[in-house]
DNA sequence: TTGTATGCGTTATCAC
DNA sequence: GTGATAACGCATACAA
């Protein structure tokens, strides 16, 4: 009475078995190149393979996972995929996972915490064996993460230090980055430097700021509080641009003297450059600007933006390797058990910064 | 002997049933709010729900799909996720799918055809009920698509017209876009216009070119072949920038006279702007530049780039709706059955184009 | 109002 | 060398 439905259903193992005249077990063994297939006659194998190909058989991954009790998938939950920051990160993850049997499943929370939660549930429901969280900017809803801990899914977050909650984290060394940015500007001769800091709730921002101050104090430079600004915490993460634009415009209106801008990130730098452009000031001739992150954007602007690169490809790769390793601990894990993974940033020199010209007075006359 | 393993396995329906003292069916019915749950005592429901919550029960989506014979997933296969073009597209897809029970599974082929194929197989293997292909740039491997047709999975491609292969396609009206771009430049007074066309293999490019010529012939403008360039087909899609940069530099070296550049896309426009910047020419004062696409980038440059926007959010949304609709045909499908969906582009005026100034002679002296 | 039995497509354990 | 058969976790028709 059953199974005669040729409706819209997929070709199954049983179908192939029937068509090839062998049992499902044999077919399964052959098609998977299982150890036992060594004992299967070459002819049989060939025949089965051919038949399966003809029929367009695609093994049902769901059923397979159920049976094998592994899904062979790793969830990648991105808080905001439109953040240029995470693109290379995804690439790093994918490239690392590609040669393995693990499949990344990418979900994007679109900046909505509820969505983040829902997708997290779905990922758990799909029995991902590991989880990579790409957390950028504000991302407060860590409560939901308790679920994960309950389900003992190995997890790694990248882009945010969650070690206080004992979650393994991969982040760039923001302090070193801030230090490097400041050092770069200083060594070019800049002293009157504007700081466009990120929202204060943001850990990244304060770390970078620490690095900046460390360098300043090392060389005995006083940071002018009148030149220090702070972005409001914005709901829309892309509005670093708006922030940079607004702050810089105000700065120009106030007719304060400065020769360089150190922006919290590249988007903010882009906003600052826009403000300068509107005011008719040229970068880098009239003012140097340095950013942070090295988003794809930074290289494509004119002038190209000097920035502190986060090694995003590497960070993605590392995150992927970390979860892979905690899924099946390979060999003796060197120091992979440690919680915080701090990657070194890199100064990328482009055209938006240059040596301070002799003439010191550059107040907008 | 069995099932007593408290290893690292998940909480199952049976576990909840055992713990709550009811049968798996009752638990299943309650937890799914199935029709039959109307007849279950309120107390029972509450008890079961509470228990399930406490135990951290997450239904196994794999097993569920198997049983229900729907995966409730839609595969989204992107040829190159780092292409800024596709970000908003993904957003459009996600937002449309979010309120439905369908889950998008995003995969990125990272520009590699083999990877594309592999992921396609995996998606089919995971029994996605629909497929959205985000095809940008060159993307020749349509052969693999025969698999999909075999499996009768509803499919929609966006960003490329594949209707010749009778695949439903969502694309911007490139011809209209080219026309609009040309019209914009012309109406600003520009006559000596440089054309930076895309690779000739690319359908988008030739359509845009058609639109350009149509406008030109309407107003009786002769297109100067010496000012017309064509990008080589490049393996790396991001190298539109390089192409624009190189072509424009050569152009400047040749000391040809021009007052505007119509670039095939925003990246190419950005490259052109860089070349102008390097040569010390200002945009838009010395030369207007118009792009195509309106990638996020375009708004953030200084000057902001005037461009022809592809309504990517809408395109994503439409694609998602189309596959949803062919999964379960809702009501009388108006004209959703048609193959080609052409969306209108929109001129976004920013700062990179302006009225041609009176002084005509602008050969680099 | 709740429980029992069966099937979904695979894999794995054992017999033959 | 190959073929039955029992899980895997869930949903559901049918019984009670």
Image (cartoon, coloured by chain):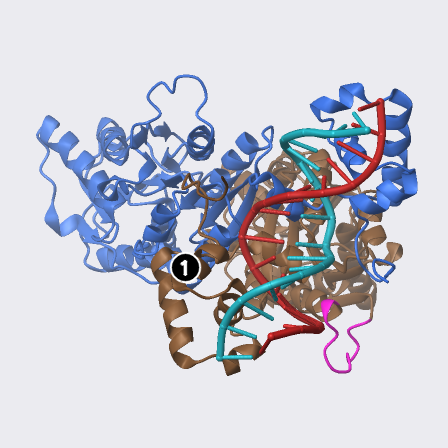
Chain colours: A blue, B brown, C cyan, D red
| Residue A119 lies within the magenta run | no
Q: Nearer the viewer, residue B235 or A334?
A: A334
Kindly report the secondary structure that dominates the magenta region of the rendered protein. loop
Give the vertical position of B365 relative to B19 (above or below): above
Q: Where is residue B98? Give x, y as percent.
A: 54, 66
Quarter of image, res B153: bottom right
Magenta range: B327-337
The answer to which quarter of the image holds residue A251 is bottom left
Mark 1 surroundings: few (<14), some (14-19) or many (≥20) residues within 10 A: some
Say which quarter of the image contains residue B215.
bottom right
Q: Is residue B332 magenta?
A: yes
Regarding residue A257, the answer to whether it shows in the image is yes
Residue on which disc 1 sits: A117
> Residue drawn 44% across and 17% down?
A331
Q: Which residue lies at the image location 27% right of the left edge and 59% below the top edge?
A: A233
- B87 relative position to A315: left or right: right
Name the spot of residue B31 as percent of width and height, x first.
Answer: 48, 68
């Amino acid at each position: 009475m059953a199974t005669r439905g040729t409706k819209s259903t997929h070709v199954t193992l049983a179908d192939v078995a029937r068509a090839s005249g062998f049992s499902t077990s044999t077919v399964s063994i052959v098609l998977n190149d299982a150890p036992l297939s060594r004992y299967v006659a070459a002819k049989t194998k060939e025949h089965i393979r051919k038949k399966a190909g003809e029929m367009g058989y695609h093994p049902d991954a769901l059923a397979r996972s159920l049976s094998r009790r592994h899904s062979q998938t790793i969830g990648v939950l991105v808080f905001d995929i439109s953040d240029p920051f995470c693109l290379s990160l995804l690439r790093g993850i994918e490239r690392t996972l590609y040669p393995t049997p693990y499949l990344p499943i990418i979900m994007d929370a679109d900046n909505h915490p509820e969505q983040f939660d829902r997708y997290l549930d779905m990922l758990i429901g799909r029995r991902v064996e590991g989880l990579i969280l790409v957390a950028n900017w504000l991302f407060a809803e860590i409560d939901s993460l308790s679920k994960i801990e309950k389900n003992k899914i190995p997890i790694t977050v990248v882009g945010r230090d969650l070690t206080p909650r004992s979650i393994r984290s991969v982040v760039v060394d923001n302090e070193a980055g801030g230090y490097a940015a400041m050092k770069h500007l200083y060594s070019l001769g800049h002293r009157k430097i504007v700081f466009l800091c990120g929202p204060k709730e943001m850990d990244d921002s304060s770390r970078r700021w620490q690095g900046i101050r460390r360098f300043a104090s090392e060389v005995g430079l006083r940071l002018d509080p009148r030149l220090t600004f702070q972005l409001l915490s914005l709901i829309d993460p892309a509005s670093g641009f708006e922030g940079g634009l607004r702050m810089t415009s105000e700065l120009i209106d106030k007719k304060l003297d400065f020769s360089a801008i150190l922006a919290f990130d590249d988007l903010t730098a882009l906003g600052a450059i826009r403000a300068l452009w509107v005011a008719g000031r040229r970068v880098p001739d009239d003012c140097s600007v340095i950013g942070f992150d090295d988003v794809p954007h930074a290289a494509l602007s004119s002038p190209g933006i000097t920035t502190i690169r986060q090694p995003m490809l590497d960070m993605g790769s590392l995150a992927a390797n970390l979860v892979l390793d905690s899924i099946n601990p390979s060999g003796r894990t060197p120091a992979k058990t440690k919680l915080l993974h701090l990657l070194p940033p890199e100064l990328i020199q482009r055209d938006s910064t240059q040596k301070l010209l002799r003439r010191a007075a550059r107040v907008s006359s």
